[in-house]
């Protein structure tokens, strides 16, 4: 008796351009396009178009979008060794270099081993006073009834925190330079992902956006190299990430070069503040529109904190605060897409689909989080989805705001602690109300940002100063 073989499912997808593949649709409506892909099945095949086929010298070049958590687990975890990180646009490569976000294989594993202790365990809890102190200083400048751009406020706050962790010093005028460089870089990365012509145009070509980008990046790099040289000349090292990098050795026992240190610092500088700032911005946006959630949050903060600033010891008791944070990350994950994976060999997915060798695989946490199969009524903001009881019903790998597997975000523990501490510190003192007449939509650039400034009115809850934190 011979084994009976069943044919794999026929893969389809939305109509795309024969010449340009999905790129015109992605430019017009990136998020809507991936929502439409959900209706075509667990694995959606997107032909890349004749132009890409000619450039790659490969027929039937396609990207495969994964919509089922079991397939996502298979690619990111179970069979992750079959996949390498896909190519990125030139501007993204220029920004991050060989930082841990962009390396692969043994180099990536070695970098993770080096950095993991810095963002976990006692090392993370030691940052509590820094985070709450910075957040308290920020709201100390707020006046009852004033209007703030909450995204800008959150970005300045998280940038000041990560700068201290990286360099052991306060950020000064560098803040505006870094923020401007990030904003321009984000737009250019999105442009290069969406446009083959833009991705093939060298950065030295003096277009207006290239000139602005290069000027901002050079200014940011100059500051970082200045910090590195200052520290190399110093007689005493601080307990910060720069000190860790200066003491590190490569596999052959050699110290890291300035370029290698620069790549890691830029990676953590951008990834370590931009994502948390966006997550907090979306959380304030959501809280401003759901009064019952905000009232329950206030009750929990009053019960757990009273008039005190939050501590690391208080975090396990901020259960509803964490539910709000997790639901906000479900609706608006800052890392809305993961880097494309490229298959080394043919792969049979749990859904039954067979991916050919060299297949490009795309996974979007945002799209999975917004799929009604995994989260009923997915557009509704409902923190109860993340109660202990409700979380046990979630399909594994249907919630992946920090990715999964060997490339899971290194800073996940730190980001969660930072987000909860800032949320608790601010929400225990102020309510934030969205200014009327604004239309706030998600903009999928390098991170999922609001498409316009988010203007909010701050309203003081209690005018008394909090007592010092109690450990």
Image (cartoon, rainbow, N blue to C red):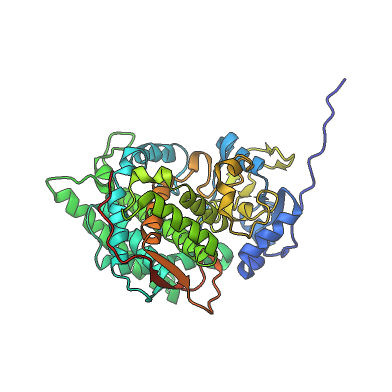
Q: Residue furthest right?
A: 1
State left or right for residue 320 relative to residue 463. right
Residue 451 vertical placement versus 271 (above, below): below
**Quadrant occupied by the C terminus:** top left
The one nearer the camera, 229 or 40, is: 40
Closest to the observer, 123 or 347 = 123
Depth order, front residue of 147/201? 147
Residue sitting at x 53%, y 64%: 291
Q: Is residue 413 above or below residue 223?
A: above
Q: Residue furthest left?
A: 235
Image position of 137 with respect to 313: above or below:
below
| Residue at horizontal 82 percent and vertical 38 percent from the top | 7
| Rendered residue at 82%/35% (across/down) | 6
Residue 72 location in percent, x, y?
62, 43
Residue under the point 52% across and 56% down: 328
Tell me if residue 299 comes above or below residue 19 in the rendering: above
Residue 160 visible in the current orientation? no
Give the residue furthest to the top: 1
Look at the image and tell me whether residue 178 can be seen: yes
Q: Quadrant of the N terminus?
A: top right
Q: Position of residue 54 (x, y in %)?
A: 65, 58
> Horizontal and vertical percent for residue 319?
47, 47
**In the rendered view, does 293 fall on the left or right side of 468?**
right
- Seen in the image, is 341 located left or right of residue 126? right
Spot occupied by residue 433 in the image (x, y as percentages of width and height): 46, 71
In the drawing, does residue 236 fall left or right of residue 1?
A: left
Q: How many marks?
A: 0
């Amino acid at each position: 008796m011979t084994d009976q073989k069943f044919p794999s499912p026929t893969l389809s997808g939305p109509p795309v351009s024969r010449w340009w593949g999905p790129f015109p649709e992605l430019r017009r409506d990136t998020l809507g396009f991936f929502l439409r892909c959900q209706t075509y099945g667990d694995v959606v095949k997107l032909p890349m178009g004749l132009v890409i086929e000619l450039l790659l010298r490969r027929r039937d070049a396609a990207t495969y979008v994964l919509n089922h958590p079991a397939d996502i687990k298979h690619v990111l975890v179970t069979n992750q060794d079959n996949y390498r990180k896909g190519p990125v646009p030139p501007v993204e490569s220029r920004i991050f270099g060989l930082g841990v976000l962009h390396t692969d294989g043994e180099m990536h594993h070695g970098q993770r081993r080096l950095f993991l202790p810095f963002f976990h365990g006692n090392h993370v809890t030691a940052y509590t006073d820094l985070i709450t102190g910075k957040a308290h200083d920020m709201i100390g400048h707020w006046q009852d009834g004033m209007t703030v751009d909450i995204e800008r406020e959150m970005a300045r706050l998280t940038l000041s925190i990560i700068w201290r962790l990286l360099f052991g010093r306060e950020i000064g005028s560098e803040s505006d330079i870094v923020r401007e460089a990030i904003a321009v870089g984000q737009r250019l990365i999105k442009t290069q992902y969406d446009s083959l012509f833009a991705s093939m145009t060298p950065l030295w070509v003096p277009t207006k956006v290239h000139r602005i980008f290069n000027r901002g990046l050079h200014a940011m790099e100059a500051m970082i190299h200045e910090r590195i040289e200052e520290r190399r000349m110093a007689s005493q090292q601080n307990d910060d990430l720069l000190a860790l990098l200066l003491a590190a050795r490569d596999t052959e026992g050699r110290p890291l070069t300035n370029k290698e240190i620069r790549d890691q610092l830029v990676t953590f500088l951008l990834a370590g503040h931009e994502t948390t700032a966006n997550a907090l911005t979306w959380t304030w946006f959501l809280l401003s529109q759901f009064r019952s959630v905000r009232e329950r949050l206030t009750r929990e903060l009053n019960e757990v904190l009273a008039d005190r600033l939050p501590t690391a010891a208080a975090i396990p008791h901020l259960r509803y605060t964490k539910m709000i944070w997790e639901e906000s990350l479900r609706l608006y994950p800052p890392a809305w897409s993961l880097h494309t994976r490229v298959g080394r060999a043919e792969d049979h997915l749990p859904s039954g689909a067979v991916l050919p060798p060299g297949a490009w695989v795309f996974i979007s946490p945002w799209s999975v989080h917004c799929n009604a199969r995994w989260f009923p009524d997915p557009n509704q903001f409902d923190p109860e989805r993340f109660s202990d009881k409700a979380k046990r019903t979630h399909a594994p790998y249907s919630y992946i705001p920090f990715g999964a597997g060997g490339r899971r975000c290194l800073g996940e523990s730190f980001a969660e602690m930072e987000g909860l501490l800032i949320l608790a510190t601010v929400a225990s003192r102020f309510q934030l109300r969205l200014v009327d007449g604004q239309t706030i939509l998600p903009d999928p650039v390098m991170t999922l940002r609001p498409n316009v400034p988010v203007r909010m009115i701050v309203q003081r809850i209690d005018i008394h100063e909090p007592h010092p934190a109690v450990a």
